[in-house]
Amino acid sequence: MTTKVTRRVALLGTGGLAALAASGLKAPAIAQRAPIKLGGIATLEGPFATGGQDAYRCIQLELDRMNNTVGGRRIELIRESSNAQADVALARARKLIEQDGVDIILGPLSGAEGIALRDYSRTLTGKTIVNGSSGASDTTLRNPSPNFFRFSTDGTQWMAGLGKHVYETMGIREVAVTAGDYAFPYAQVFGFNLEFCRLGGRVTHYWAPLGTTDFAAQIAQINRSNAGAIVVIHGGTDGLAFMTQYAQAGGSKPLIGGSIMADQTMLSARGPHRRVMAGMLSAGPIADVIDDPMWRDFVERYRRRWLNEGGFQSPSIHGVNYTTNLYGILHALREVDGDLSNNQQAFQRALAGARIKAPTGADVRLDHNRQAISDILLNKIEERDGRAQVVAFGKVPQVNQTLGTPEDRFLALGAPSRDNPGCIAQGS
């Protein structure tokens, strides 16, 4: 039987269609199975542009694989670009919701952007925001929003096991931390320091605003210090600038990297920084070399599609995080058969209860704040197959957002910041 869409039915709108259903008449199929509008926000401008580009590569890779269809409905991806600034990300999100009418937002990439979108999500009804790669801990830990979900682990979680390794295995008792002066590096520094300082380690901090290009004075101070290693928690062009200038200054201290330092966005760039990065340790949710068949398949598909079109030898941390969050969205859409009615209540319940695998093969589930619990890898940069690769040599399984500390005690430590970097004395 063919349903005829009359002018009267077309003018009824959503409320009219609901009335038709209540009266027993069949609503037009075209309205029932309209495309799901997915809005993407990633940084295609500013210091993290290469990571944002890779995020969209990975999203397209997975949507193409499923023919842009889930639960019997097409997915229409509407892309927006930010520049790692909270106000810009918020403006892009408003445009996607208010002008493009998207159902779900996937993004953003950077820490302060995530907090801004978390706050914006509270003002929305019948819409859902699922994180991209933003890693600030407070996005979900403090004052979480009921319609903001994060299937990727946060910056504090990404450092699990690293401080302990530096202190106990490497035998280093004092480090210099150089980090960006904004939300994501605060979380990374906090995660490293909680372990390192509690064991008795000493830390001197050197902060730099996002977009810093001259690290000469900072490097000179660090090189004169008694630090046994340098913990570098920058990313994008900031990380490249620091490492290049450190190499040019003849730096020789062992390097410990933040999670977005040990990544193909850094290793694929040419320059003197490559020399000092050899052997650098790091921790995080991914590595180039992981002994897992799901990861090997993902990397192979990524290379086939993107290696000759601007992609890396291995997907970036941002690409993997966006994919992990996309997997959460797709899982929930399958669970509800693509039904986003009733203010997306069933869809959001399906998100909250989802158990998925990340592209790395790691198991992912959400806590009561809708924040991921998953595995963290300990990594080392090695030369393999004639190029620098991040190789996983250890794993900390199922790390939660408070690193195993009871939540009330963790919250009592205060939010990560430059004035609260997590260097808590032993026994605290």
Image (cartoon, grey):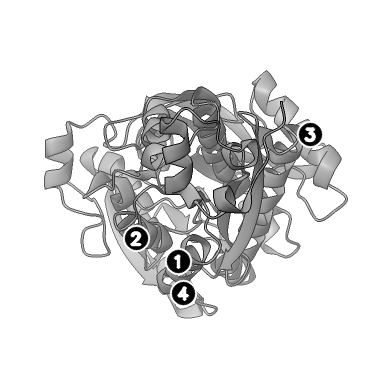
Residue at position x 73%, y 60% from top?
Answer: 269
Q: How many residues crowd mark 2 within 10 Å: few (<14), some (14–19), many (20+)?
A: some
Residue at position x 40%, y 39% from top?
Answer: 344
Q: Earlier in the sequence, mark 3 or mark 4?
A: 4
Q: Secondary structure at mark 4?
A: helix
Work out how far the residue at label 1 is from the one at label 3, CA to CA, in angstroms: 34 Å
Point out residue 166 in the picture as x, y percentages from the top left corner. 40, 39
Q: How many residues crowd mark 3 within 10 Å: few (<14), some (14–19), many (20+)?
A: some
Residue 130 visible, this orientation: no
Residue at position x 40%, y 47% from top?
Answer: 155
Residue 393 visible, this orientation: yes
Question: In the image, what residue type sits under mark 3?
Answer: Arg
User: Where does label 2 land, which residue?
Assistant: 120
Q: Is residue 133 above or below residue 95?
A: above
Q: Which mark is residue 301?
A: 3
Work out how far the residue at label 4 is from the one at label 2, CA to CA, in angstroms: 42 Å
Point out residue 263 in the picture as x, y percentages from the top left corner. 62, 49
Q: Nearer the viewer, residue 295 or 193?
A: 295
